[in-house]
Amino acid sequence: MLTLKQIYDDKARVIAGLEKKHFAGATEAIEEVLRLDTERKAAQQQKDAAAAEMNRLSKSIGALMAQGKRDEAEAAKTQTGDLKAQIAQYDTQMAAAEEAQTKLLLTIPNVPYDLVPQGASAEDNLAVKVGGWKFGAALAALDQPNEKAFSAEGAAIALKDWPAAEDPQPAYAKLPHWELAKKYNLIDFDLGVKITGAGFPVYTAQGARLQRALINFFLTEAGKAGYIEIMPPAVVNQASGYGTGQLPDKEGQMYHCEVDDLYLIPTAEVPVTNLYRDEIIDEAQLPIKNCAYTECFRREAGSYGKDVRGLNRLHEFSKVEIVRIDTPEHSDASHKEMLAHVEGLLKKLELPYRILRLSGGDMSFTAAICYDFEVYSEAQHRWLEVSSTSNFDTYQANRLKCRYRRAEDKKVQIAHTLNGSALALPRIVAALLENNQCEEGIRIPKALQPFFGDDMIR
């Protein structure tokens, strides 16, 4: 959540940032946070004054008794009792103001960085890089080095201005992945409906092997990049959900085990980042780099239509997540390293991709800046999101009380947290199947062949 220091230091920037995220009532919410802080401070001052007076009176009682001034001593005792009751009342007022302030702050999203574009929807997202295919001249400027692509100076195209004629088209009509899944006995969507419900596919034979191959490939690549693997629980408690910002923002999208008050994780970000809740980390340990494979569970309430067919939108899916804890000074460099890592995976999988800088209206509740990676589906003739890679600045860490101790002066500071999908499997599988189909079967990319154990699905 936002810190009071952020708000006091530059209230106008905070409000403008919240408006960029289209947070309704930004000014009113921030003013209420400050009013509650003023109320808490006033109660604190009154408590301190009452405590000082009670301390003075307590010290005088012995002297008054020694001087034989019993009546005055008894009056002082009565006054200290009254002051003690007042102090308890001030404590109650302070606690109530602080609780109301915290509840309000938990409902206020993160403030986006200046680099985040204005916009109300995905149409306003900026494509900052494309790769993996021969695009026409209109997109040539987006084929550029990472540093330029992820800076304010890099070329960019809003999705609403994306040249449709430039979208790569296959040389011949290709089957969508749900038809390929039947043809090669890879995924059984009907069995998933039978045993659980829609959005819970059953992977079979070579389909199951492809899943396992991708998981191992992603984890191996993360290990090469210095990420330490974690195998966390797939359910978390309420405190963990609040820590990373899924609660209260996405409560309706999470599966809730009501008897035990536990939540099925929507991403490994939640348990892995919460490893560092209520921790003070020595600066020498940073950046912390973790990765984790988990099953992920999302209700996806309200999703319908052609875009949810097959693997396009599921309630349960596999994903490898990368998570970093870092200092404010290095977190931007960390973010760029994460983006380069995800891009490297897509290159090795030989998939056409584009990288989007999300607009304020399309960003998550918790992110300060976010880049989405999309791969192109030859059969569906559209782009499929496969990763979101975000820097949360201090927003999550403040909720988590995740701090670090600076080496220079031993001061304790709030850390920065970052995470990204590296990668989510369903749409990667969809694109691999659709883009690599040929007369002999489905070609397996060279980098994946050692993990799959073959060069083709036949």
Image: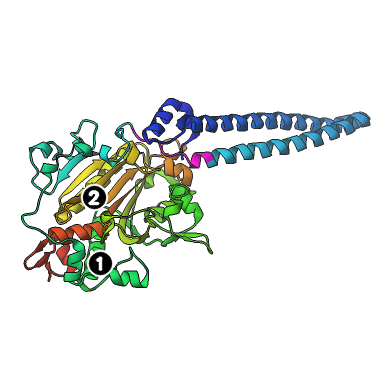
* Disc number for residue 242: none
What colouring style does the render use?
Answer: rainbow
Is residue 84 in sight in this rendering? yes
* Disc number for residue 342: 2
Mark 2 or 1 closer to N-term? 1
Q: Which residues are magenta?
A: 104-113
Find numbered disc 2 in the image and state the secondary structure of the residue it sits on. Answer: helix
Q: Nearer the viewer, residue 368 or 181?
A: 181
Q: How many neighbours does mark 1 have within 10 angstroms: few (below 14), some (14-19), or many (20 or more)?
A: some
Residue at 90%, 29% in the rendered image? 72
The amino acid type, in three-letter code, at marker 2 is Val
Q: Tell me the quarter of the picture where residue 34 sits.
A: top right
Q: Position of residue 158 (x, y in %)?
A: 22, 36
Residue at 52%, 62% in the rendered image? 258
Residue at 24%, 47% in the rendered image? 373
Which residue is label 1 attached to? 212
Q: Position of residue 224 (x, y in %)?
A: 24, 55
Find numbered disc 1 in the image and state the secondary structure of the residue it sits on. Answer: helix
- Is residue 22 covered in magenta? no
